[in-house]
Amino acid sequence: MFIYLAFPDLREVIPRKSQVTLFRLSDMVSDPLSAELKSLFEMKEYKYLSAYVNQSKHQSLVKRNFSCKFDVSFEEHPNQIQFDQFEYKGSFYPQLEAFRFTKEYGSIILRKYILIGLSICELLENGHSCQH
């Protein structure tokens, strides 16, 4: 929504804001925003998140059997949800603990989103718009 409002000329190319995606935007803006977006798409953390979201629309990747460990000396979070390994569009994604995903992958993705936001602000401050 923010991007759609920030770049009014997007409405000429993409009439519905629900059709605005970061992938489409990456080809319509100049650097440094275009470069930041393209580097986001290449990050293993972002690829995992994107594949997980798309795959989980069709298949649950969280097992529903639960067990409890009382010896906590081996792991920081012994009783946590784990995402099963999966394959999406020919790429293999390993099993991953939920806390690890949110702590490690989430913080990496968040930092990249902040850099993308700063690039958007820089473009807007310099009077740039989307390229058609």
Image (tube, rainbow, N blue to C red):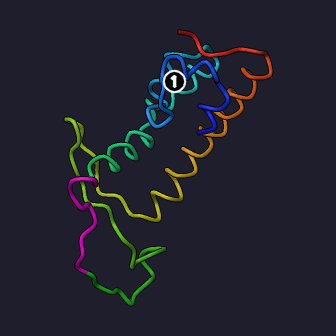
Image spot of residue 105 (x, y percent): 49, 50
Name the residue rendered at 53%, 17% in the picture.
12
> Could you tell me residue 109's position as x and y percent?
54, 44
Seen from the viewer's position, the closer of residues 120 and 4 is: 4
Seen as rendered, the residue at the extreme bottom is 70
> How far across and how far down the image is residue 43, in percent?
46, 35
Above or below, comparing residue 53 to residue 126 in the picture? below
Q: Position of residue 55 (x, y in %)?
A: 26, 49
Magenta span contains residue 40: no
From the viewer's perspective, is residue 17 above or below residue 97? above
Magenta segment includes 59: yes
Question: What is the chief secondary structure element of the magenta stretch?
Answer: loop
Question: Residue at the top extreme?
Answer: 132
Along the viewing direction, whichever of 111 and 68 lies nearer the viewer: 111
Which residue in the structure is indicated by mark 1? 25
Q: Which residues fall within the magenta stretch?
A: 56-65
> Which residue is found at the position 61% from the left and 18% from the top?
9
- Tag 1, which secondary structure? helix
